[in-house]
């Protein structure tokens, strides 16, 4: 199947219909909590992160209180999220930067977010989009996989896929489409065994295994 502009538009239309109103699964109450939750979410499920952050933020709800907690205690609080040592190191360094340079507040500027320890394009895009309502597409493993399978945007790196999605999807739909793709990856187009027989995008998907 040759994926034309018209087919991409149809893919986006179907995703928007099926996953209308899709929102992040991470639980947060302010930009700081969202930032820490997204850092913790690397190679960890959102459900597990929510358990960890509920416990962590009850003890340390802001950057200064995490600094006061100390690295050893922070490691113990986030131990069940995996990669806890590197995550604790990045979270502690980020909290120090927030306190020393931004009065403890999370900066809204995308390029400034990227300078925070442990914050890459995915995290910065999520915070920009979800916390500050700015159009952005964060490419996680689900978005990367679905975009390539649909050929909605192809690439060997998240950056290439992000740039492709920004061209294929209208700017006003970037933030919403990010969540559509994530939920489609979780529910239908799974990594090891995509449920092609149940997929509402089967007729406009070049990777539909039911046709192979």
Image: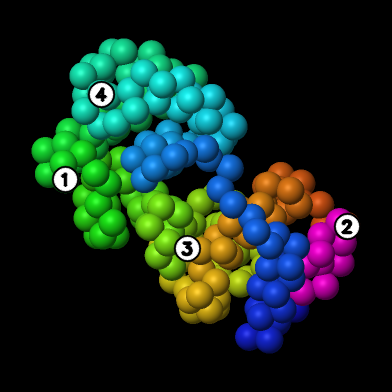
Q: Position of residue 29 (x, y in %)?
A: 44, 40
Residue, disc 1? 102
Image-quadrant location for residue 62:
top left
Instruction: Give the magenta part as a residue range.
Output: 198-212
Mark 2, secondary structure of its residue: helix
Image-quadrant location for residue 70:
top left
Q: Earlier in the sequence, mark 4 or mark 1?
A: 4
**Which residue is painted at 81% across and 52% down in the image?**
195
- Judged by depth in the image, the label closer to the viewer, 2 or 3, is 3
Separation of marks 1 and 3 at Cα, in angstroms: 25 Å
Q: Earlier in the sequence, mark 4 or mark 3?
A: 4
Mark 1 touching mark 3, by CB under 8 A?
A: no
Residue, disc 4? 65
Q: Position of residue 164 (x, y in %)?
A: 49, 73
Sort mark 3 into few (<14), some (14-19) or many (20+) by Cα contacts within 10 Å. many
Label annotation for residue 137: 3
Mark 1, secondary structure of its residue: helix
Sort mark 2 into few (<14), some (14-19) or many (20+) by Cα contacts within 10 Å. few
Left or right: 45 with respect to 187? Answer: left
Q: Earlier in the sequence, mark 1 or mark 3?
A: 1
């Amino acid at each position: 199947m040759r994926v034309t502009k018209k087919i991409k538009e149809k893919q986006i239309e179907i995703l928007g219909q099926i996953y209308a109103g899709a929102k992040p699964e991470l639980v947060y109450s302010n930009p700081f909590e969202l930032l820490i939750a997204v850092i913790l979410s690397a190679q960890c499920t959102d459900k597990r992160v929510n358990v960890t952050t509920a416990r962590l933020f009850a003890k340390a709800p802001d950057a200064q209180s995490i600094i006061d907690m100390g690295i050893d205690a922070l490691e113990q609080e986030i131990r069940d999220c995996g990669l806890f040592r590197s995550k604790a190191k990045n979270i502690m360094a980020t909290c120090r930067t927030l306190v020393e340079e931004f009065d403890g507040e999370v900066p809204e500027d995308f390029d400034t977010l990227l300078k925070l320890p442990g914050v890459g394009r995915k995290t910065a895009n999520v915070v920009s989009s979800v916390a500050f309502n700015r159009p952005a597409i964060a490419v996680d493993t689900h978005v990367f996989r679905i975009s390539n399978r649909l050929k909605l945007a192809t690439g060997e790196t998240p950056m290439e896929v992000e740039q492709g999605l920004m061209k294929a999807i209208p700017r006003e739909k970037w933030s919403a489409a990010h969540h559509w793709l994530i939920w489609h990856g979780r529910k239908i187009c799974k990594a090891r065994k995509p449920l092609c027989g149940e997929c509402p995008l089967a007729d406009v998907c070049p990777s539909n295994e039911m046709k192979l």
